[in-house]
């Protein structure tokens, strides 16, 4: 191949690779633009104050009330509930696999947990309807087991493989020398785990929790199936709820084009987007703060 | 007569099928510095680590024989390994400060062993002074320990060991990752610690062994070939192997 031809191939390939890289950024920018452009259209109809402070989401009514508050509370409630279950469970499981499990069990446990992530969210929704729903109804003596608690449990199941896998990697990556230093000072396994290994793995653990939380906030199908779909302000975990994601999924298909209701769905999607963005940035900030203690 | 502080008798150690230490018999005298020398893979570090039971962490390590600190059997089932490690401290080859602040690196061990909270700051200051580190770090105790230079980190690791007031300090090539000036400081520190502690040090540096140790043990293929005063080992070795090694003919 002549030098000139080689140089040309080189240039073309460079352009292709640059284009693929930039395409991702363009995609993110486009989604961002679409959400906010349509949201601005919404806020020309409805004041942001009513949107954030009202208490009812009722687009079908004559006047149409659009308050994100009950939806946001629903999303927050199931996400918080799922993390309440999944974070301790996930981190302790990861610590067990990484630090305590005999090698044979380790080899079995990791792929099995990762397989949990392969279950489609619709199938997990089934689980909520036929198993966890009735169980909750019976346990608490209520009519309907499709509520925030049900959603929290299912989302915890879905977030667990993410949290366990990343947390296990983080704990595993803690240098053996830290643990040796701790043991040599007379610390036992537990003190070493809780005072040295887990703090050293903290950046990775925060990343694990953030990704798990991201999954819980963005998950649609499971919460749509298992939480009862009541767009009212929840008073507790035993109330039926409707998350932001489920609302968009249910209503987007039927809403007339470019009506207030249509724009409203973009506005709530934009709010969700901002929340996940902030969570990611916070996670990054904390991860950096702890990273400076590492060589 | 000199008091025997630490000893191994009929010590055999193997990892799985592979025997690393063969019938080791050795006594270390109180308040002396003892160097373990020998080519890589001869079992120096393995011997060192058997005294504070670091091999407990490897499931396929088998230790046979009697190891004693004074009259305490180190492998007695009723003895807590954490107590042993408090009395026999260890400094590693690569400086390994915990990913915490300078202060927390020292308070960690004190808290583990439940020293009274109100005594901790004074104990830390004393240990840092003894480790010749106080003047360099006294204004930045909250700084992450990894921000210190390699030599400072290693002195911190020594301070972290010293703060627990052990009886024996094991050092596994503590200067191998350091420059000559830092090495000089550590050697000076070792000499000053000798009055309070018994120090067993693994080293590949013949000059260092001669400078700091009272006695030297030459090991080869898992056996102690010669164990004598530093002067005898280097100037008048009894064994052919020792003579070749300290003379620089192999290793």
Image (cartoon, coloured by chain):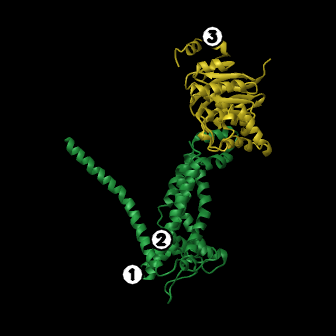
Chain colours: A green, B yellow
Secondary structure category for the residue under label 3: helix
Task: Give x and y (percent) for residue A7.
Answer: 24, 45
Query: In the displayed structure, would residue B231 be above or below residue A172?
Result: above
Residue count near mark 2 (Cα–Cα under 10 Å), binned few <14, some 14–19, many ≥20: many
Pointer 3 and pointer 2 on the same chain: no
Disc number at residue B17? none
Look at mark 1 in the image and give the residue it sits on. Answer: A257
The mark total stands at 3
Residue count near mark 1 (Cα–Cα under 10 Å), binned few <14, some 14–19, many ≥20: few
Residue at the image point whose x is 40% and y is 70% from the top: A34
Q: Is residue A186 left or right of residue A54?
A: right
Look at mark 2 in the image and give the residue it sits on. Answer: A270
Query: In the displayed structure, would residue B156 be above or below residue B238?
Result: below
Pointer 3 and pointer 1 on the same chain: no
Look at mark 3 in the image and give the residue it sits on. Answer: B235
Pointer 1 and pointer 2 on the same chain: yes
> Residue B55: which quarter of the image?
top right
Secondary structure category for the residue under label 1: loop
């Amino acid at each position: 191949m002549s030098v000139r031809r080689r140089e040309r191939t080189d240039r073309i390939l460079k352009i292709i690779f640059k284009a693929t890289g930039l395409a991702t950024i363009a995609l993110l920018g486009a989604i961002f633009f679409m959400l906010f452009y349509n949201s601005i259209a919404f806020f020309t109809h409805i004041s942001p104050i009513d949107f954030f402070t009202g208490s009812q989401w009722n687009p079908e009514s004559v006047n149409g009330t659009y308050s994100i508050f009950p939806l946001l509370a629903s999303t927050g409630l199931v996400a918080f509930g799922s993390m309440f279950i999944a974070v301790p469970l996930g981190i302790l499981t990861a610590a067990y696999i990484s630090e305590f499990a005999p090698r044979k069990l380790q080899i079995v446990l990791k792929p099995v947990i990762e397989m949990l992530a392969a279950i489609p969210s619709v199938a997990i929704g089934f689980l909520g309807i036929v198993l966890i729903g009735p169980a909750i109804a019976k346990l608490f003596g209520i009519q309907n087991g499709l509520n925030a608690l049900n959603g929290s449990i299912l989302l915890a199941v879905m977030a667990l493989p993410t949290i366990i896998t990343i947390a296990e990697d983080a704990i595993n990556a803690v240098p053996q020398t830290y643990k040796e230093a701790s043991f040599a000072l007379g610390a036992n396994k537990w003190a070493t785990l809780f005072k040295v290994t887990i703090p050293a793995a903290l950046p990775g653990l925060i990343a694990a929790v953030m990704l798990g939380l991201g999954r819980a906030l963005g998950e649609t199908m499971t919460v749509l199936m298992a939480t009862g779909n009541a767009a009212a302000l929840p008073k507790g975990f035993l109330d039926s709820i409707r998350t932001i994601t489920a609302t968009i999924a249910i209503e987007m298909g039927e809403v007339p084009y470019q009506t207030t209701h249509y724009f409203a769905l973009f506005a709530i999607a934009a709010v969700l987007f901002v929340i996940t963005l902030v969570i990611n940035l916070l996670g990054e900030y904390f991860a950096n703060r702890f990273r400076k203690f590492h060589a | 007569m000199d008091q025997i502080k630490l000893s191994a008798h009929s010590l055999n150690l193997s990892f799985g099928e592979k025997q690393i230490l063969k019938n080791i018999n050795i006594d270390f005298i109180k308040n002396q510095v003892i160097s373990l020398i020998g080519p890589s893979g001869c079992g120096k570090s393995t011997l060192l680590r058997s005294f504070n039971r670091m091999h407990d962490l490897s499931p396929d390590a088998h230790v046979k024989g009697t190891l004693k600190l004074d009259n305490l059997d180190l492998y007695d089932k009723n003895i807590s390994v954490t107590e042993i490690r408090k009395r026999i401290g260890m400094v590693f080859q690569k400086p390994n400060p915990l990913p915490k602040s300078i202060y927390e690196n020292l308070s960690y061990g004190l808290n583990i062993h439940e020293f009274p909270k109100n005594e901790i700051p004074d104990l830390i200051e004393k240990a840092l002074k003894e480790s010749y580190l106080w003047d360099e770090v006294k204004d930045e105790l909250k700084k992450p320990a990894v921000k210190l230079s390699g030599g400072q980190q290693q002195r911190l690791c020594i301070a972290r060991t010293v703060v627990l007031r052990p009886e024996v300090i094991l050092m596994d090539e503590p200067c191998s990752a350091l420059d000559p000036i830092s090495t000089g400081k550590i050697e000076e520190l070792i000499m000053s610690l000798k009055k309070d502690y018994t120090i067993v040090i693994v080293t590949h540096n013949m000059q260092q062994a001669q400078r700091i140790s009272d006695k030297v043990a030459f090991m080869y293929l898992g056996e102690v070939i010669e164990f004598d005063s530093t002067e005898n080992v280097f100037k008048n070795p009894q064994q052919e192997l020792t003579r070749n090694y300290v003379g620089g003919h192999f290793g």
